Image: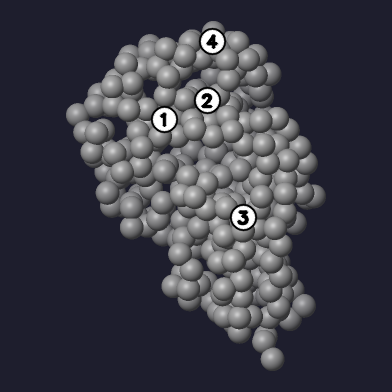
Amino acid sequence: MPRRTVRLTLERFAYRQPFRISGHVFVEARLLVAAITEDGRTGRGEGAPVYFLGEDADHMLAEAERVTPAIADGCSRATLQALLPAGGARNALDCALWDLEAKLTGTPAWALAGLARPPQPLRCVLTLGADTPERMAEAAAALDPAAPIKAKLTGEPALDAARLEALRAARPEAWIGVDANQGFDRAGLLQLLPVLETLKIALVEQPLRRGDEAAMEGLPRGIPFVADESALTLLDTDRLPGRFAMVNIKLDKCGGLTEALLIARRARDLGLRLMVGNMVGSSLAMAPGFLLGQLCDLVDLDGPTFLAADRDPAVTYHAGCIHCPQALWGFP
């Protein structure tokens, strides 16, 4: 008889309002939840599809079902890395195994991960979807005044400049970064860079398309560039120095906390700064990212703020920080 039971479910979480980025508008999140039970204890993990690679919820579920017999027979996190490719399915299962190990051993996940101290509240970015300049300024003014702001751009230099000028007028003292989600070409980015410098924008995330990284060579380096879609897994990390100053590690992209920790350590060795992000999910997905965030320079774990409803217990956002309750994930 298998030593474990595995339960896989797809869950829908509606967005509070449509969320626009370059090339996409999101109205709901379809998420995979994995629950692995052993000796009366259950570990849980959540995965979201990596939309820009064509992954969807049904594909995640099929991938996870393919390895369910191995998980039931006692598959380890290390073995799982070889059984499934990076993506939302492996993330859900990997994080469920971390949570299960914490519950079975009585050792919190932060200690299993080799962190020196329990997770602390983290300063957390809040993101604005692309909209008219007026609406983005209004939304920025309504945000927690202590929180850093990340603004989505769409690769339209004149409109993006107007958006950022409105944001800076609404929040003159705020830390503001921008995320292009592959929306620019080199010419458009060159056109916008002087505006970004004038408005004291802190960083530019993924300005060009994945696969077009060579076009970044020779660009002015007054503002740090952050790799997101260009950096999926550990194998991508060595190609980043010289083109990017920071890497955005997302557990869904790399397939779980196990690989995310390896990326973080390798990136540090290469002199890269670290960011932890999310594909939008519930608090269950933010909790493993919150653990990784203890190693990062910038934390972007605001996924639940876009949802009409979240889980209970849930992460909370207060005074510019994200707080993660122990009961959510990763503790005995």
**Residue at numbered disc 3:** 57
Image quadrant occupied by the N terminus: bottom right
Mark closer to the chain start, 1 or 2: 2
Mark closer to the chain start, 1 or 4: 4
Which circle marks residue 183 in the picture? Answer: 1
**Residue at numbered disc 4:** 166
Residue 205 is situated, as x and y percent measured from the top left of the image, at 42, 33
Which of the 4 image quadrants contains residue 171? top right
Marks 3 and 2 in Cβ contact (< 8 Å): no
Q: What is the C-alpha distance between the residues marked 1 and 3? A: 24 Å
Q: What is the C-alpha distance between the residues marked 1 and 4? A: 20 Å
Residue 146 versus residue 61 in the image, above or below: above
**Residue at numbered disc 2:** 151
Q: Is residue 98 left or right of residue 265?
A: right
Mark closer to the chain start, 3 or 2: 3
- Mark 4: few/some/many CA within 10 Å (<14, 14-19, 20+): many
* Kind of residue at disc 2: Ala
- Mark 3: few/some/many CA within 10 Å (<14, 14-19, 20+): many
